[in-house]
């Protein structure tokens, strides 16, 4: 048995509330821990590990226990901080929509079981600059603010990261049409109309959009399949499945939804495996929670080949350094009115990347050298 297969066995036991199989001798606790961390599913694994007869001991036990205690703290902090942020926006008369993990946590048997890296909010149109003042008042520091057309990132040490979104999908995304008018479709909290939520049908479809985006661009970990399972089981009577069936072909998501559902059924409901699902599961287990640079570069290179006829590594590298105007406008909205700024903003983006994200730059260059 591989480390991946045993991790899946532990997750399955947690989801089904069953006794897990004992750890095979040839699998180390450290390797298992590293893989669970890679996929952000440590708590799903730890829940079952606690039921084992032969539990990890000594330093290995401490490794898992420390992670559990840290995740417990983060879970409480994230949920309480989300409430505080929504209280502050309400005081200022700003509408706000919590996204993704905030709602998924409540679909899991325990909120700690659904780990999330950051808090995501969609902000009422035209209010993103006012959010900047609120975040400052709440002692957040700006991490990436004002330079991205999609969202602003704020951090509060040691554990909190908040992304305030202007829109759910950028205009460069194929299915942005589905979310462009999302604010008009939101439901209001009966006790506070400024706090918004999606219909469960929109929630499910946005989950698929977000999941597929990461899956295609670099890979998305096993947590997405667990999310798929809970979305389809807990929300099965709350989603308009006729509407979903009608709109998936328009999104070109029929096959992806079938894959995600098929894997969820195989892992947690004794569904059948086939070659297509096996390949998808292998890819997912190798990509981790946030995907890999290697897979992202494959995705981008194929996209450039198809759309722009770029067929060499040099051509790809040049385009990555000097992105087309449409994508630069997405990063720098001022370009829409001041096109003459393009060469200066190319330089700004390059220097910003080198000085603020040098590890990613080095990783990308290394990946390009390996590309075929």
Image: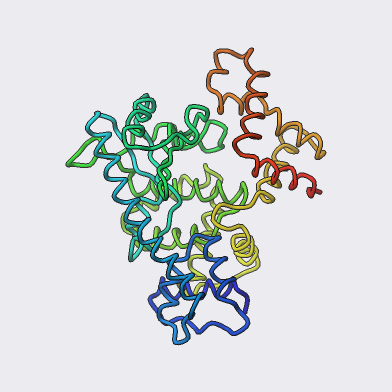
Vertical side of 355 occupied by 326: above or below: above
Residue that sits furthest to the bottom in the current view: 53
Nearest the viewer among 181 and 330 is: 330
Q: How is the image coloured?
A: rainbow
Identified at 74% across, 42% down, the residue is 365
Residue that sits furthest to the left in the current view: 191
Q: Is residue 4 left or right of residue 230?
A: right
Tell me where residue 136 appears, x and y as whole percent: 36, 32
Tell me where residue 201 appears, x and y as whole percent: 37, 48
Nearest the viewer among 266 and 19 is: 19
Q: Quadrant of residue 48?
A: bottom left
Tell me where residue 291 appears, x and y as whole percent: 60, 52
Nearest the viewer among 9 and 243 is: 9
Q: Is residue 229 left or right of residue 332?
A: left
- The quadrant the N terminus occupies is bottom right
Identified at 52% across, 43% down, the residue is 251
Counting every numbered tag in the picture gives 0
Identified at 65% across, 40% down, the residue is 358
Tell me where residue 353 appears, x and y as whole percent: 63, 34
Q: Is residue 97 left or right of residue 365?
A: left
Identified at 46% across, 62% down, the residue is 226
Vertical side of 1 occupied by 288: above or below: above
């Amino acid at each position: 048995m591989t480390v991946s297969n045993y991790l899946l066995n532990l997750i399955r036991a947690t989801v089904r509330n069953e006794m897990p199989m004992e750890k095979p001798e040839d699998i180390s606790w450290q390797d298992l821990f590293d893989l669970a961390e890679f996929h952000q599913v440590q708590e799903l694994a730890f829940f079952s590990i606690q039921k084992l007869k032969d539990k990890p001991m000594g330093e290995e036990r401490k490794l898992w226990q420390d992670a559990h205690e840290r995740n417990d703290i983060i879970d409480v902090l994230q949920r309480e901080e989300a409430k505080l942020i929504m209280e502050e926006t309400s005081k200022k008369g700003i509408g706000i929509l919590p996204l993704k993990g905030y709602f998924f946590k409540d679909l899991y048997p325990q909120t700690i079981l659904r780990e999330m890296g950051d808090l995501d909010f969609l902000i009422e149109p035209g209010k993103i600059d006012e959010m900047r003042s609120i975040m400052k008042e709440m002692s957040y520091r700006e991490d990436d603010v004002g330079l991205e057309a999609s969202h602003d990132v704020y951090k509060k040490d040691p554990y909190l990261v908040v992304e305030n979104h202007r829109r759910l999908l950028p205009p460069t995304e194929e299915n942005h049409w589905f979310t462009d008018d999302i604010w008009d479709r939101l439901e209001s909290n009966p006790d506070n109309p400024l706090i918004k939520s999606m219909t469960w049908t929109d929630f499910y479809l946005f989950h698929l959009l977000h999941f597929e985006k990461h899956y295609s661009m670099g890979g998305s970990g096993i947590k997405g399949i667990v999310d798929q399972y809970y979305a389809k089981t807990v929300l099965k009577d709350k989603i308009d499945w006729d509407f979903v069936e009608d709109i998936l072909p328009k999104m070109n998501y029929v096959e992806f939804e079938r894959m995600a559902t098929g894997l969820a059924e195989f892992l947690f409901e004794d569904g059948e495996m086939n070659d297509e699902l096996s390949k998808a599961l292998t890819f997912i287990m190798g990509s981790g929670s946030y995907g890999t640079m290697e897979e992202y570069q494959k995705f981008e290179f194929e996209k450039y080949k198809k759309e722009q006829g770029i067929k060499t590594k040099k051509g790809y590298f040049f385009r990555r350094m000097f992105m087309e105007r449409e994508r630069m406008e997405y990063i720098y909205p001022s370009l829409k009115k001041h096109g003459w700024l393009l060469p200066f903003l190319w330089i700004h983006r390059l220097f910003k990347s080198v000085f603020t994200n040098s590890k990613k730059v080095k990783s990308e260059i290394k990946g390009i050298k390996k590309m075929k």
